[in-house]
Amino acid sequence: MSDNQSWNSSGSEEDLEPKEECGHAAGVAEFSGVLSKWTNYIHGWQDRWVVLKNNTLSYYKSQDETEYGCRGSLCLSKAVITPHEFDECRLDISVNDSVWYLRAQDPYHRNQWIDSIELHRSIRAGRTERGGVQGSSLAPSAPVDSGYGSESSLRRHGSMLSLTSATSGYSATSTSSFKKGHSLREKLAEMETFRDILCRQVDTLQKYFDSCANAESRDELQRDKIVEDDEDDFPSTRTDGEFLHNNNGSREKLFQSLSLKGINGIDFKGEAITFKATTAGILATLSHCIDLMVKREDSWQKRLEKEMEKRRRIEESYKSALIELKKKSHFGGPDYEEGPNSLINEDEFFDAVEAALDRQDKMEEQSQTEKTRIQRSSPVPPGDVYSSSGSHRFSDKVEEMVQNHMTYSLQDVGGDANWQLVVEEGEMKVYRREVEENGIVLDPLKATHSVKGVTGHEVCHFFWDTAYRNDWETTIENFNVVETLSDNAMIVYQTHKRVWPASQRDVLYLSAMRKIVTNNENDPDTWLVCNFSVDHDDAQVSSRCVRAKINIAMICQTLVSPPEGNREISRDNILCKITYVANVNPGGWAPASVLRAVAKREYPKFLKRFTSYVQEKTAGKPILF
């Protein structure tokens, strides 16, 4: 995601929340600092000023631009923070389909950012939860809606003020409560109400039956007493002062009085009708509950089938997308970049690098045909200036590197050196030794070449002098001289053009040019340029590029064949024998096959391009020994 597009990272409709929704994390201090943000596959990681405030993460191009407005922001309420599985300095923050890839300078600072983000989120969640609890405590509870009114209103009814007393001509199937279509929850509430009513009715009927039983017992006792009184033909008096006589009329009056007073005024017929209506309502509601559950089961079964079909289609789409993704170049986030955990396999990585190199070559050819060269001439210091390493803080290191190259670089490639010939084009031969360290390819390369019409001094001069660097070097994006140490030594910082999916490389090196003084006059005139990596305070390592380490030497020997007769030496009598050695540590992981293939392809092209340039620049010019 580029910087120009990142403002959309929280702009979807789902993320457009009120300001209080994003939270004002009261009591949480603002947290800010520099993080590297992944922009796109061209510019890679770029340093950005990131601010965490009020549960919102914003970023600016630099700290000086904070007053002009942020370039993008994320509300952290719905954000997912994922520490990278392998990169200890990286964290990914995603909201829906938008992802920010961020990288701290070390694991400690990454953990600081994660802790601060989680602190903002937790305080925001706590405020939301407290607000929700307070709001819920003030909300009244809605009564359960059923055909009989609310549950509480039914429970206030007495046993007699029940279903039948509220509705004349009661029918279990005609009440609105029994209409189908109510939710299962409503039906269950009706069932609970019916249960309470039925319990009260059962209690009422039980009291009625108990009263009947008690009345029957008292009647039997009275009958026994009356019989005894009749046998004695003696009238008796009841406790209520009523006289009982021994005749039929008195017995009927007695039994009638006992029966009416023992019932306690309970309407048995009304209670029986109500009981019957309640049980009918229960049965009807149970039937409707069963129907609702059956319908719900059918509905869920259909929904399950739809979800299974949807899952099958998504799996098929996912498989087809994977197949299409493998056919195309990967222009995704940093997980598709160079590294041991890259999602690109070795073959795809190789194809992408080859395609990028082909595009660069085509662009270079077009620019060369359109560009008109400006003839420049820089003053060449006298030869004795290059006879020593000069006087500076790296003098001893330069002298050591020169002696090592003169001792080992000019050795024959045969014997136990294990050099393998990988390219042979005319006079040019390129050798390689396969060396790996911790999975990183460190293959030393050695190339030999013979060029007619130029001297070793001329070849080394054009190779060393930065005034001509852009004329023949096509892989450099930009460079600058960090420090000039002496007339023949300087420190140079240069960045190379990016070849996706490989990361961009930069190099900081000391470049020194030397004339090798020999004691034997028969030895060929020898010149050398050595470039080796150093450290400098003005060119620190940045997260934008991977710092490569180099140790390179261009050793040129001038061979002169005597002219015929008294003719002067011309360029036809000159041959330059070139030995070029390169030890490069790419600084990051990349497939070994890719690095070796690029080296095999680019080094011969570089030598041919450079030597052709030197021949073009020296044609018709005085010979520089």
Image (tube, rainbow, N blue to C red):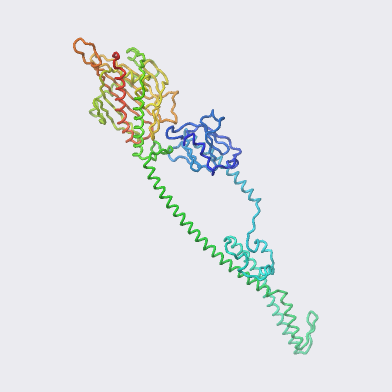
The quadrant the C terminus occupies is top left
Q: What residue is rendered at 48% in x and 36% in y?
A: 102
320 over 74 or under it: above or below: below
The location of residue 89, given as percent across then percent down, is 46, 36
Q: Is residue 624 in sight in this rendering?
A: no
The location of residue 33, given as percent across then percent down, is 52, 32
Q: Find the residue positioned furthest to the left.
A: 565
- Residue 5 lies left or right of residue 200; in this view the side is left
Q: Nearer the viewer, residue 509 or 162?
A: 162
The location of residue 467, given as percent across then percent down, is 38, 19
Q: Nearer the viewer, residue 391 or 257?
A: 257
Q: Find the residue positioned furthest to the front.
A: 370
Q: What residue is rendered at 78% in x and 80% in y?
A: 239
| Count of numbered badges drawn on the protein | 0
Specify the quadrant of the image occupied by residue 326: top left
- Residue 294 lies left or right of residue 474; in this view the side is right
Q: Find the residue positioned furthest to the top.
A: 566
Q: Is residue 143 in sight in this rendering?
A: yes
The location of residue 473, given as percent across then percent down, is 35, 24
Q: Nearer the viewer, residue 402 or 384?
A: 384
Specify the quadrant of the image occupied by residue 372: top left
